[in-house]
Image: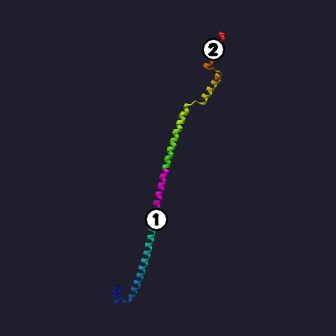
Amino acid sequence: MEPMEQIQEKKKGLFSHQAPVADASLGMVSADLSSATRRLRLIEERLGHMQKKQQVSDQNMLQNEKKWSVENKHIMDEVMEIKRDIADVKDKVNLIVKELKGCASKEDVDVLGRYINLWDPLHFVTRKEVEKIVRDVLEGLKE
């Protein structure tokens, strides 16, 4: 015998007037169990979908993190290269400044210009010219 028939036989005895209530209760329990099973399946399906979405989100996040990491490395490399270039430019500018400190200033050049104008070197004679003049004078005296 099945369990349901055993319950019904037991109830036919002294409490026979409660048998329809037991059948109704069993029907309600069966319906409730069926409903709970259906809801449990729906929840399991939703959970499965949510897990798949979570997995896709995790994969996308990992891909983006890798991509950003590579981009960040490239940016850091470029920044380091720019820093090296800036340091090189600073060194060259400092070298130019040192060399310019060794050059004559505008005032020095102006002073030299005044001396040159004062001496008027265009009217200077060369050694050869002086020797020629001396020879010419000596020859003039001999004559």
- Residue at point 61%, 26% (across, down): 112
Q: Position of residue 7 (x, y in %)?
A: 35, 86
Foreground residue among 38 and 94: 94
Check disc 1 and report its element: helix, strand or loop: helix
Q: Which residue is drawn at the image coordinates 43% and 75% (left, top)?
A: 41
* Residue labelled with disc 2: 135
Residue nearest the viewer, comparing 118 with 142: 142
Which region of the structure is painted magenta? 58-76
Q: Indicate left or right for 62 with 7 as reference.
A: right
Image coords of residue 89 (percent x, y): 53, 41
Tell me which label, 1 or 2, sits earlier in the chain.
1
Place residue 62 in its image quadrant. Answer: bottom left
Q: Which residue is mark 1?
A: 56
The image quadrant that residue 133 belongs to is top right
Q: Does the segment drawn in magenta span residue 70?
A: yes
Image position of 105 with respect to 127: above or below: below
**How far from the left and from the top, in percent, is residue 131?**
61, 16
* In magenta stretch: residue 5: no
| Amino acid identity at mark 1 | Val
Q: CA distance from mark 1 to mark 2?
A: 110 Å
> What's the residue type where badge 2 is placed?
Arg
| Above or below for 93 versus 107 | below
Please rate how many residues cluster around mark 1, counting C-alpha atoms within 10 Å: few if below 14, some from 14 to 19, many from 20: few
Q: Are marks 1 and 2 in contact (CB under 8 Å)?
A: no
Number of marks: 2
Q: Quick one: quadrant of the N terminus?
A: bottom left
> Relative to 106, is 35 above or below?
below
